[in-house]
Amino acid sequence: RGVIKLLTTTTFFVQLEMYGFWPMGTTMVIGFLAIVPSVNGSLPIRAKYPFDSTEGLKHRIAFATQATAVVTAVVGILFMDAVILCFCFYTMPQLKLLDSNYRHCQLKWPRAGFSAKFQSSKGPNAEISSFIPFDPVEACETNDSFKKRFITCIKHHHRLSNIVDDINNIYGSSMFFQLFASCLMICLSGFQIAL
């Protein structure tokens, strides 16, 4: 029950992020392109073009270029946020399971299997009360002992540590640029609305 509750909570937060951030991004794009006043052929983003962008087909081309740039920037920001949040949301249950397994290394706690019966995850008994295996070999361990359980926990801890290090190596520097892009978009949007 505890694992199901943990995964249900994680899935809820991922869905909340998806159904919350994407409409906000869509609203930002629509607001930026439609609500920002365009008087006398002006464009939502002030820019200089090598041609007169105030009338006719050239205005439409310049507007389409700016709309594409805004949509691309917002989608990039939202995608990066979604990827990082999903990594965080799905790493947290692994850490909670690892914490539970460290507490349940003693043999007085049962070893769970993969063929668990589905029960409601609500109620006071929705806590993890067994040692949770991470692969089928661990679930079918015949010579169960504290040492084997503890070694399993250490292996999983090492695996999680490697995953977090890989995520930091891949996304560490790009998160700085993503944060810079987010701040820049917010500041420019506020500046455009103020004008």
Image (cartoon, helix red, strand yellow):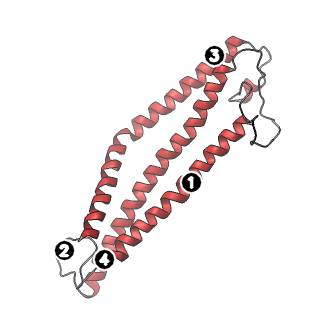
Circle 2 SS class: loop
- Mark 2 vs mark 1: which is more N-terminal? 1
Q: Position of residue 4 (x, y in %)?
A: 71, 40
Q: Which mark is residue 49?
A: 2
Q: Amino acid at mark 4?
A: Phe
Which residue reaches farthest bottom? 56
Instruction: State how far apart marks 1 and 4 are (Cα).
Output: 33 Å
Please state, as top left, top right, bottom left or bottom right, where the N terminus lies in the image. top right
At horizontal 45% and vertical 66% (from top left) the residue drawn is 26
In this view, 117 is above or below 105 = below
How many residues crowd mark 1 within 10 Å: few (<14), some (14–19), many (20+)? few
Q: Position of residue 114 (x, y in %)?
A: 77, 33
Q: Amino acid at mark 3?
A: Ile
Circle 1 SS class: helix
Q: Which mark is residue 162?
A: none
Instruction: State how far apart marks 2 and 1 are (Cα).
Output: 41 Å
Mark 3 vs 4: CB contact within 8 A = no
The residue under label 3 is 151
Quadrant for residue 151, please give it: top right
Q: Amino acid at mark 2?
A: Tyr
Circle 3 SS class: helix
Mark 2 vs 1: CB contact within 8 A = no
The residue under label 4 is 63
Q: Report whether 102 appears left or right of 74.
A: right
How many residues crowd mark 2 within 10 Å: few (<14), some (14–19), many (20+)? few
In this view, 170 is above or below 70 = above
Instruction: State how far apart marks 2 and 3 are (Cα).
Output: 65 Å
The residue under label 1 is 16
Mark 2 vs 3: CB contact within 8 A = no
How many residues crowd mark 4 within 10 Å: few (<14), some (14–19), many (20+)? many
Circle 4 SS class: helix
